[in-house]
Image: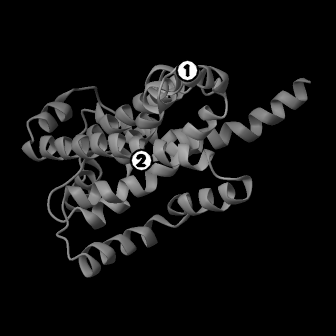
Amino acid sequence: MRARVAAWVFVIGPILVFMLGPMVLVVIFSFSANPLISFPVRGLTFDWYRALFHNREFWNALQNSLIVAGAVGAISTFTGTMAAFGLMRLGIRLKGPVLTWLSLPVMLPPLLLAVALVVFYVRMLQLPLTLATVIGGHVLITQPFVILIVLARIANIDHASIDAARDLGANRWQAFMKVTLPQIRAALIGAALVTVAISLDDFIIAVFTIGSGNTLSTFVWGKVRTTLDPSINAIASILLALTISVTMLALRLTRYRG
């Protein structure tokens, strides 16, 4: 038994270090007093965060990210929920293929999807690249997650209570608001938070479809290309904290058990 545990630790340990090590270093260097990102760390300071909070471009990027993430969360949750209820009405033979087509944006390479979106916006629709085009791209890649989460919850709701509400005179809307919605509310909130986390973390689609301006991810990329100081780690740490917090809350609300 001990040998088996030791073998698992020997295999999983290096993998965890490889995956989590860079994130830990990012957080450490965001508090480093060194003017350059290097070891040894000569002291801890909040100066890089202070410098970041006095940077107007950072606040503009943060505002854009929150606008995009909020809009994506609302739109994806609404359309994804409607799609999930529509899929429940399809037969078994149709549900699988339709769900596969709806999930296709998640399976495509992000670079390919970003290029396709730019061509679609600029060449076909002749739209200017703005935050609205970023929102459209993010909805495309987040909606499948909402559909899957809501479908899983719908499959386990008490359909007898919905039928009872209809038998007692409630129309479809009343039955949904008073019976169905309370049963799926946690899943909807969790799905919305998942889409927000994905939107905050996305870079490839954002950098191709935003035109002028920045989101947090593109702002970090711009700073990396021009300079390399610990303020970049401060931005990355803030983005990491936002993403992890939203994801953990979403997993808790959706009652994920692994």
Residue 121, x across and y down, in percent: 27, 72
User: Left or right of 237: which side holds 146?
Assistant: right
**Which residue, given by chain and number where applicable, does mark 2 sit on?**
79
Quick check: 18 above or below 99?
A: above
Horizontally, residue 91 falls left or right of residue 177, namely right
Whichever of callouts 2 and 1 sits on the residue coming sooner in the sequence is 2
Element assignment for label 2: helix
Amino acid carrying label 2: it is Thr
Query: Label 1 crowding class (10 Å Cα cut-off): few <14, some 14-19, many 20+?
Result: some
Residue 93 vs residue 231, the one in the foreground: 93
If the image is split into quadrants, where does the N terminus sit? Answer: top right
Q: Would you say residue 83 is visible in this rendering?
A: yes
Residue 214 on image: x %, y %: 19, 54
- Residue 165: which disc? 1
Instruction: Specify the amino acid type for callout 1.
Output: Ala
Tell whether 6 sits left or right of 21.
Answer: right
| Viewer-nearest residue: 151 or 28 | 151
- Give the x, y percent position of residue 141: 44, 55
Tell me: residue 169, above or below residue 233. Answer: above
Q: Nearer the viewer, residue 99 or 53?
A: 99
For the residue carrying disc 2, how many other residues have a C-alpha within 10 Å: few (<14), some (14-19), or many (20+)?
Answer: some
Q: Residue furthest right?
A: 1
Helix, strand or loop at mark 1: helix
- Residue 174, image x and y in percent? 44, 25
